Amino acid sequence: MILPQGTVVAVTDGEKLDLYRNTGTGAELSLTALPDISIDDEAKGSGGRHGSTSANPDESQMSEDGFSAGVAQYLNKQVLEGGIVNLVVISAPRSLGELRKHYHKFLSAKLLLEIPKDLTGHSAQDVEKAVQSA
């Protein structure tokens, strides 16, 4: 897929967020890492309840859901403030499902592509390959 210059690529897995910006031109994809940001993982995931029974997510899953909700909150804010014009989200499948629950309608309109894959901690080149093959 060809991404417009300036497109932000968010790579997350429920514990970590890596952000990149496409600095390439035309068909050339060149992802440049953006500075790390702090995510409010106190945001509540869709679980909503505390406790660890078979019907409720465990503490670790609740933490990951909260982190994913915080990532969505951050991305929503960036879209609404004009800091993100085009967006690609690459996320572990379960985290992607949680992210989707928190997308603002304006974020959804800016979303060019979602890739359900865990690429956090991978190189920018690995992320580029995933985008190009999507």
Image (tube, helix red, strand yellow):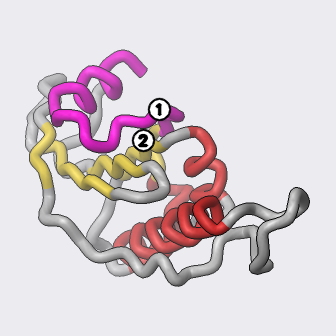
Of 2 and 38, nearer the camera is 38
Residue annotated with mark 2: 90
Cα separation, mark 1 vs mark 2, equals 6 Å
Residue 31: say if magenta: no
Question: Is disc 1 in contact with disc 2, using a CB cutoff of under 8 Å?
Answer: yes
Relative to 55, say whether 81 is above or below: below
Residue nearest the observer in this picture, 27 or 74: 74
Tell whether 122 sits left or right of 30. right
Q: Amino acid at mark 2?
A: Ile
Q: Quadrant of the N terminus?
A: top left
Q: Check disc 2: other Cα within 10 Å, few if <14, some if 14-19, many if 20+.
A: many
Residue at x-position 42% and y-position 81%: 40
Residue 86, percent across and down?
A: 35, 52
**Highlighted range, magenta:** 114-134
Q: Position of residue 11 (x, y in %)?
A: 35, 47
Mark 2 falls on what kind of element?
Answer: strand
Q: Would you say 82 lies left or right of 6 here?
A: right
Q: Which of the 4 image quarters holds residue 85?
A: bottom left
* Residue 71 position by quadrant: bottom left
Q: Position of residue 128 (x, y in %)?
A: 23, 28
On the question of residue 128 being in view, the answer is yes
Residue 101 image-quadrant placement = bottom right
The kind of residue on which mark 1 rests is: Lys
Q: Which residue is mark 1?
A: 117
Count of picture labels: 2
- Rendered location of residue 64, percent (x, y): 54, 62
Q: Left or right: 77 with respect to 105?
A: left
* Residue under the image location 53 percent in, 34 percent down: 116
Q: Secondary structure at mark 1?
A: loop
Is residue 105 visible to us here? no
